[in-house]
Image: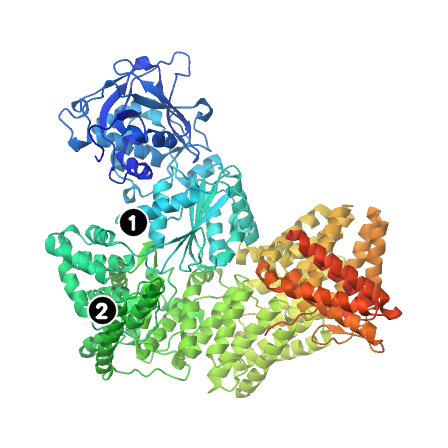
Amino acid sequence: MSSSDHESHCYIFGFGSIMNTDTHSSWLRSSGDDTVLALKGRHARILRSFGYVRRWNFRSQTGFTALGLCRPTNNGDEASDINGIIFQLPLHMLPDFDRREVGYDRVELKEGVDFQLLDREDYHGTPTNKDPTLFFDNIGTDEPVYVYIPQASSCAEADENYPLLQSYVDTVLQGCLEWGGEKLGKEFVATTDGWSSYFLNDTPSSRRPWLFRKQYTIIDRILSQAPHTHYSDRRHPEEFASAFLIKSFRGTWNIPRRNKAFVGRDKQLVAIHSKLTEQQNESIVKVVVAGMGGVGKTQITAEYCYRYYGGFYGLICWLNAEGGQNLVACYRQLMADTTDIDVKDKDAEEILTEVKARLFRSKVNWLLIFDNVEDQTILDKFLPHGSGAVQGHVIITTRVVEPSDHLLQLDCFSGEESVELLCRSAGKQNVSGAKNIQAAHELAASLGHLPLALGMAAAYMQRCDVTCSEYLYRYAKTGSALTHPALLHDYPNSVAQSLSLSLNAIKSESVEAWDILRLLSWLGPDNITKTLIRCLLNAHNSSSPSLFDGSHQESDMNFDASLAIACTGIASMAAGHAFNQRRTGMHQGVVYMTALALSATAATIFWRCTRSTSSHRIPDDGAIVDNRNNAIPTSPSARRESSNNYSPLEYEKTDEIWNILKSFSILVVRGGQGSIHRLLGEAIRAAQSKEECQRSLNICVRAMLHLWTFSSSNVETWADSEKLLEHIKSIVQHVSRGGHDSMSLQASRLSKEAAVFSAMVLNRFEEAHVSLELSLEILGGYGNKTKRHGAYLEAQSEALHELGRNFRYQGQFDRSEEVLKDALSIRKKLAHKNDVSSRQRLAETLHELGVLEVKKHQLESAELYLQQALTLRRSLDIRADPSGEVGATLHQLAAVEVQKKPPKLEKAEFLLQEALGLRMQIGQRAATLKQLARVCIRQGHLEKAGSYLAQALELYFELYGENARHINIAAVKFQLGALSCQQEQLDKAWTCFTECLQIRKSVYAYARRIDTNEYPAHLDVSAVLHELACVAFAQKRYEVADKMLRSEKELLERLNETASQPQRIHQALLTNLAWLKKCAIDRGDDEGAKMILHELSIRKKTPKRVLNDDGLQPPAAKTPDSLSIQHEAIVVRSIVRRFALASDKKRKELKRQVLASLDNLRDVALSSTSDECSKMCSVSIAFKDKTQMAMELGGDVMRSMLLQACDELRNALREQGVLVEDKVRTRR
């Protein structure tokens, strides 16, 4: 110990977790003594005469029941002896220990009266093998001995909210085993009361205790042998939640596996905790851990979690925060894993609300980790606005350094930390001896002390059984040949050189593993499975005997080339790193010189190697073939049959590759799925030549075509397809950037397939839009209709067709029509071949245009398109219609008949019945039954309609699942609501419409402004809001009806700014105002009814003129003064409205412009002398005053006041004949 022998001491009787000396170091460091790792101890026993028993009764603030001492509680119970360890504590540390034992009172003990010291032999028979220096001899006569006893207010039995935790029991019993072996452990169990059936096995991977629980076999044996411990009642987290219905979170979730080789970072760990705990006035405290990739942000954050869970936090959740969708998925899985709520029935907004509410209500300190954040502005919507009774903490890891008080910028290791990591991870035999220790110091300096590079070097040494000095020699030899033009930035050359050695070793051990690793670098970094590797291996073997070389003789030459460019830009990385260091005053000119030398060397090697690079001709006709002239199946069903045709050797080889990549720390595996660090993937990609990139991507595309089995009619293919989405998106992005023409056709079709899946199954229309635009870009860009030959035109027409359909889903009918007509133009040209498939595709686009015209209520053109499609489809052999396309067109023709005035219901019913008699997919049959029900409702056949709707709903449930949130299920719910209204079952109607609204809110969430609770701007949402209002009105719930109608009105006005259906929206607004007037009258609000009637009359009189680009058309024959004030009012109103609808950041930019424009408006109004414009002048001054008042108030009320002022000014302008429709420009 560092303390002097003459230093004054006190002594603490430890009867719980303090017996475990591993718990000492953390609070000893916080006390300012870095030299003391553990306190000296001595076996002792509190005597029965002290009058206490040991019991599980202390309620920790982190949400579990800990140990305490208490008087016997039941009549007949007696005090007992209590075993433990007395620890010697420097007297100056006693205040720190008091703070550690918050909730306990310190009570002094008298030796011989209250306790007695024991000999070590009492537990071992012979002196213990524990280090003798960790024992003290005797207690001085003037040195006090204390024990901590819980305060009565903190004591209670364990329950579902404060269970016993296995992690805490382990800590205590590990201390017993440390000091007295199994004998002390059994004595502890026997002399401890209060064991409970509320026993939560909260340890990481609780079902696999061998992974994380030290000495678990002994501990579990001790517990199981004592019936009163309730060992048999111990439950895993999901079992505990199910048994006791926990309503608040607790425990750990999704934390990465603890790194057993974690070293150093003690000061940074203390700094993180200090930053989080010193801000007592904030309900939620954030700390940002920032640094370059590979510096160890995730590792230090994970270590913080393990060190402070239990002692400080009762709940820790680890979230993948690369984007909003990833966070929503994490929250959804968190709810599924830790609660009894069925998350399948919840949309994203409901999930976020539920998680935030539980965090707010939490009774335990909680910590959220948002890992790998790219945009911190998205996090606010994922956090509660407060943390209730406890403080919430947030740690953000990111590469983006933004100076703030919450920032902890993480740098590379110190020299000592680097060497310690190598010693721990590389194997003792490889870093033993003075020579290897010296080599470790040199290697650490050469690697720039970057943890990622050090870890890879250590993994190499361990795997290949190479000493550190030998590794240093290889590293120095390899490093001179590693550089490439700038493809990575801001990284030192250490990553490149370490990775190149690992790649070299992997290739030496397995050429296939090396090849597959290079292929994996083009895919998404996560969700890597053995199935994926197996398919890549199959595609690789089908392509050629060796992926990157034509023969084994050329293999070494080409590998030299790969080494010459491995890991991307040593020169540029070194220069970039030195530049960054120079910005902080650390000029490293030598790095620049090294970089230049490396560049020259690498250029020579690369030139030598690439001269003999073999080339492979890849077909340029769009066909998907391998080098054996075997066609790769292009249909999903054929691919499903071929994707499982793997040989036993390929299964064996896959396992071998998987284990090799794991052993070199290249592949990190959690839960059967692997991940590759993004930096490594980027480096491995950049290490490939242009020709190798093309071959790699070609094989990846080929593998994805094999694995992609999505079929809209086969639900069993959906789950596997979703797992491939990110891989396909990654590959397609790389193809689009690299100009790889040889695979553009296949990549384009893959992107289109991913878009169809995103739209049809996931209802993620924005994602689908991006994928379709990328598909077109790969083919030469939108508008390029003549590229090369028929296969490209066909692929382009497919992407355009799906893009048009996707626009229709989103309510963008004009854009839908534009691209569908382009698709139609291409398909008409291709149909001249008169083959069946081209005519099918032509009919498909004619049909889609007909559906679009139905949606636009353009019945004449709709019928024309649909009849053409029907004629084409009926001209084909019925066997060529496996998807029921004829029936789908009959369905849409029936929809036309229903919408005609008067509706031709009998003809519609005949068409629908004919459609049902044909072959149809499940979804099509359900849609036709729904439409048939709609016809029956109009005919008054309500019972028959109910039967059809029940059948439709059952089919959709079979297709999507009972709890799925899909637009088709919402449509059936809507019709069920309409039917219930007809049957005067208003409660049932309200339920159906509400369920419909929840689904549509979820599906169309993309149409809602970020960070708002408003309804998505979509006509389908406005329609169901209107129906809910009508139901509430019929139930005489006028306030509810008014609220729904005003929500509908606000939504329609937003739609009016951007929608392509002004006539339909205008009519919907008139209907809405009429119902608002009825509500006001029935509520007795005569004044409100007059105001609504006034607005209604203005809207009815408003001429429907063509507007200019500003959405305005001032009338003619006005005086100069009136035109001037109207023009200025129009301009200022536009600026204010844009300000009201902008984000907080944008508002700051616009504020000065708004204030200046208001001053101009005031000046124009005051300078006007014409009587004709006096009213407009007074309205303008009032507008200016109200706007300034709203801006001074700020907050949420500002936006509503500004929009109200804009509406009042708009109405005043309309009264003077100026049409203002608030249209905004949208970008194509």
Residue 72 spot, x, y in % from top left:
39, 16
Q: Of the residues tagged 1 and 2, which is closer to the observer? A: 1
Residue at image location 70% in from the left, 67% down from the top: 1134
Residue 882 spot, x, y in % from top left:
53, 71
Q: CA distance from mark 1 to mark 2?
A: 29 Å
| Label 2: which secondary element | helix
Residue 161 spot, x, y in % from top left:
47, 33
Neighbours of disc 1 within 10 Å: few (<14), some (14-19), many (20+): few
Q: State left or right for residue 458 relative to residue 1031.
A: left
Out of 927 and 286, give the one closest to the viewer: 286
> Quadrant location of the N terminus?
top left
Identify the residue position indicated by label 2 in the image.
Answer: 511
Out of 217 and 272, give the one closest to the viewer: 272
Out of 976 and 247, give the one closest to the viewer: 247
> Quadrant location of the C terminus?
bottom right
Tell me, yes or no, if residue 303 can be seen here: no
Residue at image location 29% in from the left, 68% down from the top: 574
Query: Identity of the amino acid at label 1?
Result: Asn
Q: State left or right for residue 45 relative to residue 157.
A: left
Identify the residue position indicated by label 1 in the image.
Answer: 259
Query: Identity of the amino acid at label 2?
Result: Val
Q: Compared to 9, does 631 lie above or below?
A: below
Q: Quadrant of residue 209?
A: top left
| Label 1: which secondary element | loop
Tell me, yes or no, if residue 1005 can be seen here: yes
Neighbours of disc 2 within 10 Å: few (<14), some (14-19), many (20+): some
Residue 752 spot, x, y in % from top left:
49, 72
Q: Earlier in the sequence, mark 1 or mark 2?
A: 1
